[in-house]
Amino acid sequence: MANTAGSAQGGVRLILRLEGLCILLAALALYSAMRGDWWQFAGWFFVPDLALLGYWLNRQCGAVCYNLSHSYVGALLVCAYGHFVVQPYWLSLGLIWCAHLGFDRALGYGLKYAAGFHFTHLGHIGRRKAQLD
């Protein structure tokens, strides 16, 4: 099976995807516990994917933009800000962001390599995968 150097395979890939599912479920549970607005949740859920617009410039820019918006670092910083400054709106945005990231990871969409959108830390994705196998 073709694989990008450094990407997860086999059991490790499964564990990383299960971790993503756990993050998604935890973020949903916390959002529900804080009685978040589900219309707001739906409206913001796919906003991190706007970073895909970076691929219009080139693969390198696309990968950088995607990775910046799909790293838990930013999402958890927003959660921490919302929690410690007692700004429920920011906490809810951070939880929505975490839920999105968990959703993506559970589906196998990982951080991108500059080689192209299909090359991720969770392995190769998309229709082209079958051509490489």
Image: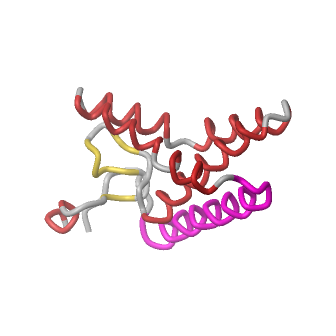
Residue in the foreground of this view, choosing between 59 and 37: 37
Q: Position of residue 21 (x, y in %)?
A: 58, 67
> Where, by quadrant of the figure, is residue 18 drawn?
bottom right
Residue at position x 29%, y 46% in the image? 117
**Image quadrant where one finds the N terminus:** bottom left
Residue at position x 76%, y 32% in the image? 81
Q: Is residue 34 magenta?
A: yes
Q: Position of residue 10 (x, y in %)?
A: 44, 72
Residue at position x 49%, y 34% in the image? 68
Q: Is residue 25 left or right of residue 80?
A: left
**Image quadrant where one finds the C terminus:** bottom left
The residue furthest left is 131
Residue at position x 64%, y 42% in the image? 93
Q: Is residue 76 above or below residue 58?
A: below
> What residue range appears in magenta?
9-36
> Where, by quadrant of the figure, is residue 92 drawn?
top right
Q: Position of residue 13 (x, y in %)?
A: 48, 66
Q: Is residue 83 magenta?
A: no
Residue in the foreground of this view, choosing between 50 and 36: 36
Q: Position of residue 56 (x, y in %)?
A: 23, 31
Q: Is residue 90 above or below residue 16?
A: above
Residue in the foreground of this view, choosing between 81 and 38: 38
Magenta region, main secondary structure? helix
